[in-house]
Image: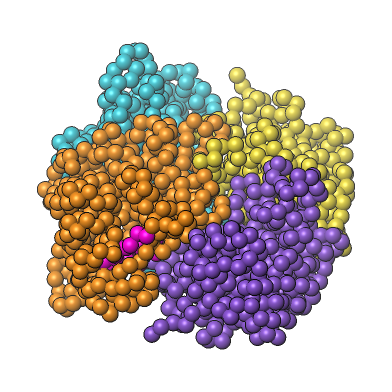
Chain colours: A purple, B yellow, C cyan, D orange
Amino acid sequence: MSKKPLNIGMIGYGFMGRAHSNAYVQVNNFFDLKYRTVLKAACARNAEKAKEFADQWGYESIETDWRKLLERKDIDAVDICVPNNLHCEIALAAAAAGKMILCEKPLALNAAEGRKMVEAVEKAGVANTVWYNYRRIPAVTLAKQLIDEGRLGKIFHYRAKFLQDWTISPELPQGGNGLWRLDAAAAGSGVSGDLLAHCIDTALWLNGRMSSLSALTETFIKERKHNLTGKVQEVTIDDACTFMGKFENGSLANFESTRYARGHKALYTFEINGEKASISWDLHDLHRLQYFDHRDESKIRGWHSIHVTDGDHPYMGKWWVPGLAIGYESSFVHQVADFIEGLSSGKPCSPTFRDAMETQVILDAILDSAKSQQWVNIPKV
Amino acid sequence: MSKKPLNIGMIGYGFMGRAHSNAYVQVNNFFDLKYRTVLKAACARNAEKAKEFADQWGYESIETDWRKLLERKDIDAVDICVPNNLHCEIALAAAAAGKMILCEKPLALNAAEGRKMVEAVEKAGVANTVWYNYRRIPAVTLAKQLIDEGRLGKIFHYRAKFLQDWTISPELPQGGNGLWRLDAAAAGSGVSGDLLAHCIDTALWLNGRMSSLSALTETFIKERKHNLTGKVQEVTIDDACTFMGKFENGSLANFESTRYARGHKALYTFEINGEKASISWDLHDLHRLQYFDHRDESKIRGWHSIHVTDGDHPYMGKWWVPGLAIGYESSFVHQVADFIEGLSSGKPCSPTFRDAMETQVILDAILDSAKSQQWVNIPKV
Amino acid sequence: MSKKPLNIGMIGYGFMGRAHSNAYVQVNNFFDLKYRTVLKAACARNAEKAKEFADQWGYESIETDWRKLLERKDIDAVDICVPNNLHCEIALAAAAAGKMILCEKPLALNAAEGRKMVEAVEKAGVANTVWYNYRRIPAVTLAKQLIDEGRLGKIFHYRAKFLQDWTISPELPQGGNGLWRLDAAAAGSGVSGDLLAHCIDTALWLNGRMSSLSALTETFIKERKHNLTGKVQEVTIDDACTFMGKFENGSLANFESTRYARGHKALYTFEINGEKASISWDLHDLHRLQYFDHRDESKIRGWHSIHVTDGDHPYMGKWWVPGLAIGYESSFVHQVADFIEGLSSGKPCSPTFRDAMETQVILDAILDSAKSQQWVNIPKV
Amino acid sequence: MSKKPLNIGMIGYGFMGRAHSNAYVQVNNFFDLKYRTVLKAACARNAEKAKEFADQWGYESIETDWRKLLERKDIDAVDICVPNNLHCEIALAAAAAGKMILCEKPLALNAAEGRKMVEAVEKAGVANTVWYNYRRIPAVTLAKQLIDEGRLGKIFHYRAKFLQDWTISPELPQGGNGLWRLDAAAAGSGVSGDLLAHCIDTALWLNGRMSSLSALTETFIKERKHNLTGKVQEVTIDDACTFMGKFENGSLANFESTRYARGHKALYTFEINGEKASISWDLHDLHRLQYFDHRDESKIRGWHSIHVTDGDHPYMGKWWVPGLAIGYESSFVHQVADFIEGLSSGKPCSPTFRDAMETQVILDAILDSAKSQQWVNIPKV
């Protein structure tokens, strides 16, 4: 029984371009799916870079203009892996061209752009998903299962952090290429859109909508040299962002992210405290879920350190044998697997553009609140 | 060489009465001091309780009226271990009577009371200290040394949490005796004065003054039966409190406390991120300090898990041998040792009433901000 | 209701003399017992040292000859805290004098001595116990409860280690005073009697008798200067010892101890693997018990990290509140409490001299096997 | 610049067949190499299984007789992923056919077979390697670097364990297909060849040759039903194996493996204690290396928890960004990368068949010692 091809057109070739390409390469080796991914074309403005990337990963062809890519009949789905300020334009065009879209997070520069994108894909009726990949780390997916089974009871607290330390040096320039994440024009914001966006997406998935928040942002280093112009310029992004708020279910939110937490490279952690049980997770040891259940017999009650590698844990039956950890990149593989499953089942691969708008709205609220120093209500999407 | 006696009059007999008594019993067995503590009198309104407590701990006599205790010539120092709403009145009288005062935290119901107490002890010139005992957990004292040596460099972040889970059940009554901590009239506040006060005291000691904050409080269970009257009454305390703010040194604050974090009994944690190094600590494993130093050679860089039990760690040379942990109660022993040292050296035993006022002012600011939903500036003491 | 006095005569003033004295001081403050310990006399050959120790700890009097101490009518119990080669002689005399005996571990230099001691106390009918204190770390006592309740099922494996690093330097002398532990004439053996003895005692208590073993010992540094004579002499102790063996219940033993494990100060760990559940513990974080139960639902199965500080955990109801750790020294307090309970109830305080003989026999077997390089059967006591 | 193809013929399709195939698929996407792997043919006796496997992984063709595979001119290298009792015959034929060989571990059923295989590949002059993949977990490779740099100083102790729990149920059958690991005729031994072999290979690599050992093996469940014949038969493998021994550098060995350690799925751990520093590692959290350096300043001395994900850690610069963990399967990718590098550089990819013979000789010694209950000297390869 031969599988249908799913021809991928990749736009971008950076860190995420690699992570997504790896997912397209690995997915059919581990998951039994009706479609087989085909790395059809890699697109980048610079032909040499595009060629090099295509050779490395096995893309069959290259394009240097994403509009050309969208015109090709042999492309089923496009993957948008370029800076945030390009997401909207490309996505609108891709939807109009009837392509499926897998878009890197955050969805857009802001909610206004995001709304257009949602409208476009829904009007076009094309399959779409946003790469909030952490939903599909097996331990995080397990957390979702435990919560959906009602094990935690009423939720009191949700706290999340995403801590890094890579911008502490004042010598680090801002600007182009790999450094667009320090430029608000390209990125929309700093750590809030880059890091907190992940925390928020997971939180909304696990704990439902938020109703209000109050935020604080800080830019520790006010000026940096631009790596292309060589000029010292104002830093326009938030270096750190913390906010507190309320979820619609009555629980309290405490969120924080920074690139100035010495000693942490990618410490995304969350903890949820419910009436009956609590859960916590940490990206640095991503295959472990900590679970505390008050219903355990008192004498032996304690946090369970669940090594999420058993065959009956989410996705894990597809990989190796119990006890053997899989890596960060597996989360992307799982998202592609679910995306393809969705093509057959009709079940959209979450988060869709519409789902991801929830995060976008909160990101706007964070920036508003930090500027006004006021509590803000979070509007409905 | 015989030592001078230091005659203690203990007011109260609860959890803290026991912890302080143990400190007076143990201190001279481990520390070489010029004074020897003498458990002279235990005071409680109920004579039977006072007697029982005195017998258990070896107090030589009892009193049932703290005013009588203050009149006794054979009492050098009084220890105030009663609910917060009684601290001020007793302290003022004790100062007037020329007694040294060791007062349980928080100093007072509010800053207004606290100011009177500071004035009273300073006017009377009596030695005074407030039992913010966590400063003297050896790992925390080591943190202070590392910071004072400048190892962390410029500080970017200070975050602290104090999480408990003992009031989750709606069946738990509020009220008298052991339950005064759920009554704002007796306690002043809920988790903010009880738990956050500890976090704030440590933070001020380690990281200096705060300039502004924005707070959120929540009372999850709105009504509880009163354990004395049997009537269902409004709950007046904060069940949970989170705040964000700024320190005068430019670092950001993220603090949280709750009694609704299932799975945590007394999880007081803090983490400080500096330009060059970071530190974190956790009361549940109190003899460990986590330390990350960016100056470590890249290949072997990682968080040091320091088992703070070596002879050259703070206070530890007085106890056992390297590798052997001491308990929570040791922090009180250390505070008594430092208090007595201070009697000889003239160096006040921190935090003094004046030091503790800094925390009191912030507690007031927290309640103000939570009520007004506004950022508030923290006034000078 | 006044309590009967239990007058203690302490022989020795070293590390263990301090640990035991602290236990006599603290026990009645935390436990409700029919006897109250009285620190009656401290005994040491050197009168000045005896005086200093007595002053520090509050002993009422001193003796410089242990025979004199045994003659005193006002001494109920003697505590033997001197080097191992003196245990036997003192214990025989103390038993003859009708004194209760609390003897530091290991019981004796060897099984032959130990047998005489058992005979002596049993003939005299005096209460006796050996200070294998780790049985009464609350987490270890909890392990015993869980095993006795049958939660582990058939046992397959028992492994234990006691790792230290304090003798790595070749500059460290051997010899007198604090260094008798490096002298086989005074200590009987090196790490086997000092460290493995603890591991063995716990193992026998938790897992029953051993039937056979094969051992390997090593002396890494063959010669050391003597700290009293100044002469370089052969080192006569074992620096490291590992053995494998079988328990009578069919489980396999893997034990190891050393003073050459860089990075470990007092890393006593054990792990027991049963058909249904496993347990592990680590002295460096002594208030935690790790427990894995295969009967937990598959999805949430993982090692429970039990913070053994709840009121219903062994001994803990007597101390503070849940979440607050107690220290190493508490194990001695608990042993005194149980010893005193035993005086009322008639239940001997384990391990008695007879119980401790089991360990002594195994220690002899270890040295035999290491010398002969053969498996040896372990004789019945 | 186009790369040379390296045409792979895979024999077997089980767990290891999948792990190796994944490595051939991923290696060129992450490593810049002169050869590009081509999945040329998959070989299995059962044509249907072979076809299914080939389709899943993208092998271009199938064979049902490995002799046919060896005759094909378009196969450069064969990968032997079949039960241990088939390694020797296939390897001899493959060498004779001039194929490069990547052979699953352990090399052979016993040292006698292994010797023939070493002779064959060396005579044929074909590139060869054995899949002791744990050498190339980045944290383990880092351990090797630290040791080779002399950071540990003189080594005193090496201990390793490999603990699993998958055969505890007496209902588990032994036999064919996936269960050949319980059949000594197919596997050569039980946990010693399956699990201890890994521990030994790493140890020899990190710590050099062993000189003598004494071993203990146990078969807890004596009889099991055979899954093909349905008959209850004697279990011929070792369920558990522990041994102690000496390395040529004077350090002591303590090794243990079992499939009866409830709570551990694949707990391969090792720890090395040197005069100046110690190292430990644990497969369950494979991207962390624990490192203790006595030369660290006393105050901040503690085990470094190195999250081995930085760009300058072994292999990690090829993957994602700091802080992001890679999985178990990466170790195989790294071995293929090194194997291909070796084709260009002429440096054999360790462990070669000759290297792997060291482990084979020790495995024989273990079984000898366990049977004779005597210490045995380990012969030179």
Closer-to-camera residue (C177/D45): D45
Determine if residue B57 is in view.
Answer: no
Quadrant where the image shows the C terminus of chain B: top right
Residue D216 as seen in the image, left or right of residue A360: left
Residue A119 visible in the snapshot: yes
The answer to if B217 sits in the magenta stretch is no
Q: Position of residue D178 (x, y in %)?
A: 26, 70
Q: Residue at x 50, y 26 (%)?
A: C54
Q: Nearer the viewer, residue C151 or D56?
A: D56
Left-right relation of C162 to A231: left
User: Which residue is rendered at x = 64% and y = 77% of the image?
Assistant: A71
Residue drawn at point x = 24 percent, y = 43 percent: D244
In magenta, the rendered stretch is: D5-23
Q: Nearer the viewer, residue C109 or A264?
A: A264
Left/right placement of residue D191 relative to residue A157 reads: left
The relative height of residue B365 versus residue B237 in the rendered view (above or below) is: above
Residue A169, compared with residue B183, is above or below; it is above
Q: Work out which residue is located at the far front of the displayed protein and give it.
A: D1
Task: State the image coordinates of residue D379 (x, y, percent, origin top left).
Answer: 16, 40
Residue B374, relative to residue D45: is it above or below? Answer: above
Residue D377 spot, x, y in % from top left: 16, 39
Q: How many marks overall?
A: 0
Give the quarter of the image for residue C10: top left
